[in-house]
Amino acid sequence: MSKRARSIWEIYRWPLLLAVIIMVGLLSALLGDGIWNALSWVLLAIPCCVIVCCIFVLRHRRDS
Amino acid sequence: MTTASKVRRWYKLHKWTSLVCTAFLLVSCITGLPLIFHDEIDALLSPATDNRPPLEIPHVSLESVVRKALHDNPSMHVLFVTIEEDTPQINVGLSNGLTPKAGGKIAVYDAYTGERAEDVLPGEGLMEKVLLLHRGLFAGVPGELFMGVMALLFVISLVSGTLVYGPFMRRLDFGTYRPSGPRRTKWFDLHNLLGIVTLCWASVVGITGIMNAASDPLFDMWRASALPKLLAPYHGKPAAEHIITPDAAAAAARRALPQMKVTGIVFPNPVMSSPHHFLIYTKGRTPITSRIFTPVLVDAETGQVAMAEPFPWYIHALEVSRPLHFGDYGGLPLKVLWAVFDGVLILVLSSGLYLWFTRRSWVEKGLDHLVAVERGQPV
């Protein structure tokens, strides 16, 4: 596995995307009903899936 | 300042702000879990047997209901009347003094018939008790201020943690999790992964927590800005004696803002409204506007509308801070997801505590080493 130093963008891009997804998800259900609620549920489920993937699925990583 | 010593400073800020607030945050997370579902829990504990639709304008006059409430509770004052939106009920807020904090109750009446339904004593319901614990650890106003400070420390901890995340992840892929390594590595990875993924949610909950803790001062700020010019003509006059009925006040508000629903009428009161005006709360009918209240001040003696302007931005921010903090909106799936995020935060906090307890952790040793190297000191 590579030990090269990552750039700021490489380190923060996934966290930033997740933050945007969460923000839109939080506001969507607040501002509308029906489909906006459903959008919120889908978006807020994404960070939960990411966590499950990282812990249980992607076990091969051995970077240090 | 060298880069490594900058990182070490942010790390120390993160460590110490977290340390002070973590125990109290854990209490907030645990008490917050049932509060997400307070509507469902309330419905379970006191199932609604009334299936009649709610009434925006009750069939009985508010004045008749207020008279009944005062007749049944002669030593108390009427502070406010609210019209329930989900069930056909009228709530009369009674108190021994000028605010609910002086001790009082809510007398509930049927909106179709005016019959007395029940008396609700504040702080009695299970969810109310959990909320009191969550907000201020049962310690009243000082407790709420304290928890507000804890929320502030939490937000500072989140910011400093995010800044420290970068340097620590320079040689690691996003989402690295090494469960077969030493235990502290595993918990370090978990803390970073869970923390950074849910950072936005935690920040929103933390910031809205601060806002909610500041709700009384913010409301007082609005009153201090809006009321003086309205009260100037009344300077020197005694408080209103022969006041109009709450029905007349509500009708005046409906005429001034025909597209809004009247949900609450606060009687003239030097603390909660104005000594010479009724304060009427109105809200809109769409999902967005139903969260934003527009206040109407109606002269208590003449029934004239003195003011019907929207609240300023900081009160609107406060109004959206409630649902955004508790996650009790958006349907059951959103509440379930909110509970999952809450659980993740509990893990982040617990892993943080574990990492802190690992004395002279290799993280700090590593940072000290880097600082020494950058400064050209012997290692």
Image: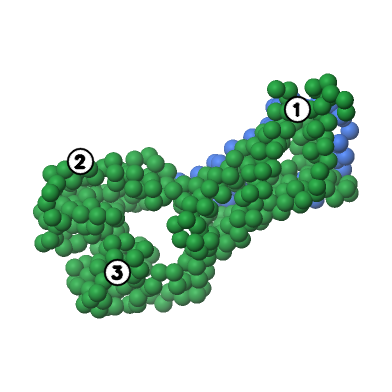
> Mark 3 near mark 1, Cβ–Cβ under 8 Å?
no
Mark 2 residue type: Lys
User: Mark 1 sits on what residue?
Assistant: B4
Looking at the picture, how far across and down is residue B258, in whole percent? 23, 50
Is residue B334 something that shows in the picture?
Answer: yes
Looking at the picture, how far across and down is residue B218, in whole percent? 38, 46
Task: Name the quadrant containing residue B93.
Answer: bottom left
Q: Colour of chain A?
A: blue
Q: Which disc number belongs to residue B229?
A: 2
Looking at the picture, how far across and down is residue B226, in whole percent? 26, 42
Q: Earlier in the sequence, mark 2 or mark 1?
A: 1
Q: Residues within 10 Å of mark 1 (few under 14, many from 20)?
A: some
Of B95 and B368, nearer the camera is: B368
Name the secondary structure under disc 3.
loop
Question: Marks 2 and 3, Cα distance to the nearest angstrom?
Answer: 30 Å
Q: Earlier in the sequence, mark 3 or mark 1?
A: 1
Q: Residue at x 28, y 62 (%)?
A: B98
In the image, the chain rendered in green is: B
Mark 1 residue type: Ala
Q: Residue at x 39, y 73 (%)?
A: B121
Task: Identify the subunit bearing mark 1.
Answer: B
Foreground label between 2 and 3: 3
> Mark 2 near mark 1, Cβ–Cβ under 8 Å?
no
Is residue A33 something that shows in the picture?
Answer: no
Residue B197 vertical position relative to residue B254 in the rendered view, above or below: above
Q: Residue at x 32, y 51 (%)?
A: B283
User: Mark 3 sits on what residue?
Assistant: B96
Callout 3 and callout 1 share a chain = yes
Residue occupying the far front of the picture = B378
Horizontal arrangement in the rendering, residue B256 relative to residue B52 (left or right): left
